[in-house]
Amino acid sequence: MSSVYKRPVYQGRTVGFEKPFLADVVQTVIDEMGAAYPELRERREFILETVDAEERQFLHTLSGGIVRLGAVIDQVKGAGGTAISGEDAFTLKDTYGFPLDLTQKIAAEHGLTVDEQGYERAMEAQRERSRRAAQFKRGGDAEVWAEMDLPAVTFTGYSTTSDTGRVVGLVVGGDTVSEASQGQQVQVALDRTPFYAESGGQVGDTGLLIGPRGRVRVEDTQRPVPGVIVHYGVVEEGAIGVGETLTAQVDAARRRAIMRNHTATHLLHRALRDVVGEHAAQAGSLVAPDRLRFDFTHTRQLTPEQLREIERRVNAWVRADAPVDWQEMGYQEAIDRGAIALFGEKYGDRVRVVHVARGENGSGPAAEAQASGLEGDFASRDSRELCGGTHVSRTGEIGFFRIVGESSVAAGVRRVEALTGAGAEQWVEQQASLVRDVAARLGTPPAQVLERLDGLLAELRQRQRELDELRARQARGALEGLLSSVQRRNGVQYLAARVEAPDAARLREMGDWLRDRIGSGVVVLGAVFGEKVQLLAMVTPDLAGKPYHAGNLVKALAPIVGGSGGGRPDMAQAGGRDVSKVDEALAQVGALLEQQGAA
């Protein structure tokens, strides 16, 4: 998709379009095609915002990419070559977002080709790195498990957190073994297990595997290859062996916390779509025991009002204690029933659909929402998603839902972070405790903290204005005193002085003031900011470049203070690191002016 818009953006730039224009083109397409494809009109705002954001982001990197490609073209031509290397083409794609066809087009304009085979080799090397990273994420031994060709595991974790299973595979140190003993890190595959393997954003279970001769503490559960669930852990006592029957005990408290967060994620997804729009599709998630994270497609930061509305909707659903059920069905049937499928996710013919009803006849989340004063047809649609994760049986088990963060993670992708249950309650109590502490320090009731803070900030701003005015008067007095230090060299007035200034902007203001008061002449000021030196030179209009040049002046002074600089004939700045040489540099101004005047 990216190459579809990147080439016209480049073409537009070559004919003089410096600002984004694709959204206007897409607007016309929507107007013309909206009757045949009504979803275009329904999602007009999101489509236009997304196109504009993508174009602006590409424009941001386009300039750098063109400079880089220009350097590559010059290098190839300079060496008498005829083709851009595949590695250079891949770097342009990986760093600057240049699709191969765009690089080929620009190269062709300069009589060059692109080494496509080398490009494919570079792409394949990246894919291999990604595969290795994914394999490491799954435990690093996916190939070992694939070679075992084990029968598909029976997962029983939807209905229980404790079951028995026979050991069908053991891996220690990357090798298959028949037995693992105390102290060894081990990977265990059972023919039957209640342990959920990390998938769909939900983290893997932890717990214990207990056998007749030993015990394994499970620290993670993964699915390195389809049909195999592997328990990663350490043998705490004794030993375990292939063929033995183990009791698999999931950490039930941790699982319940995960289930609360997973169901809350579904409710959050539904609420987001209701409040923000149906374009707010899931783009990633994390469901852990202590928190949840949900990434979704949206181009703008959520407003405080939207966050509050989403939060209130989810909590209304929680208070309604609505039933959560699931069933297996055909993929197309699930889609026809309105189930949400993740874009890009691969599904089989049979899928698991998790459903949370809205409640009817004045009950459920709709009634809770009305009682909470929420506007609109709350929960007009059920939450229905394709999901293989574990969930609570009723929404009331979530307890409480609280959003604790909202941010951007990529172009067109936002992230919401939230807590549930006791974690959410603790977070609220921490915030309330913070407000109480602040109120106590301000000597005001908690309900009046904002009013008190507004008063203090207003008072602080007034004091700051008064202080700025006092400093300005003092500075003017000091500057007026400097005017008595004006010297002459070859009939030209000049002032070279060290001054106290808080920053470069204030130094510039002082220079402007002194230049205006001199009328005709040169002003050179030096100041120290922390451990750095700043030099400023100004020449009045009647002398700038005739022959006195501020840029040449600071260029000559800067090395004395261990720095460099330059600028225009009428104004120039320089920075340096040697604060001990400021006075020495300023003492050279007269001699340098004499040299310029004699030139």
Image (spheres, grey):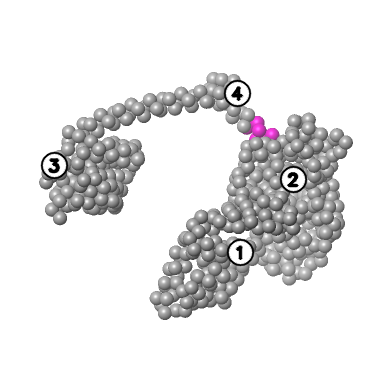
Q: Quadrant of residue 386?
A: bottom right
Badge 3 density bin: few <14, some 14–19, many ≥20, Cα 10 Å: few
- Mark positioned earlier in the residue sequence (4 or 1): 1
- Residue at the outermost right position: 361
The residue labelled by disc 1 is: 4
Residue 268 placed where, x, y %?
72, 44
Measuring 62% from the left and 39% from the top, which residue is drawn there?
303
- Mark positioned earlier in the residue sequence (3 or 1): 1
Measuring 50% from the left and 70% from the top, which residue is drawn there?
106
Magenta-drawn segment:
425-430
Q: CA distance from mark 4 to mark 1?
A: 56 Å
Q: CA distance from mark 1 to mark 2?
A: 31 Å
The residue labelled by disc 3 is: 488
Residue 385 placed where, x, y %?
78, 51
Q: Name the amino acid, label 1.
A: Val
Q: Name the amino acid, label 2.
A: Arg
Asked whether the beta carbons under mark 2 and mark 3 sit within 8 Å of each other, the answer is no
- Mark positioned earlier in the residue sequence (2 or 3): 2
Measuring 34% from the left and 42% from the top, which residue is drawn there?
504
- Residue at the outermost front position: 32
The residue labelled by disc 2 is: 270
Helix, strand or loop at disc 3? strand
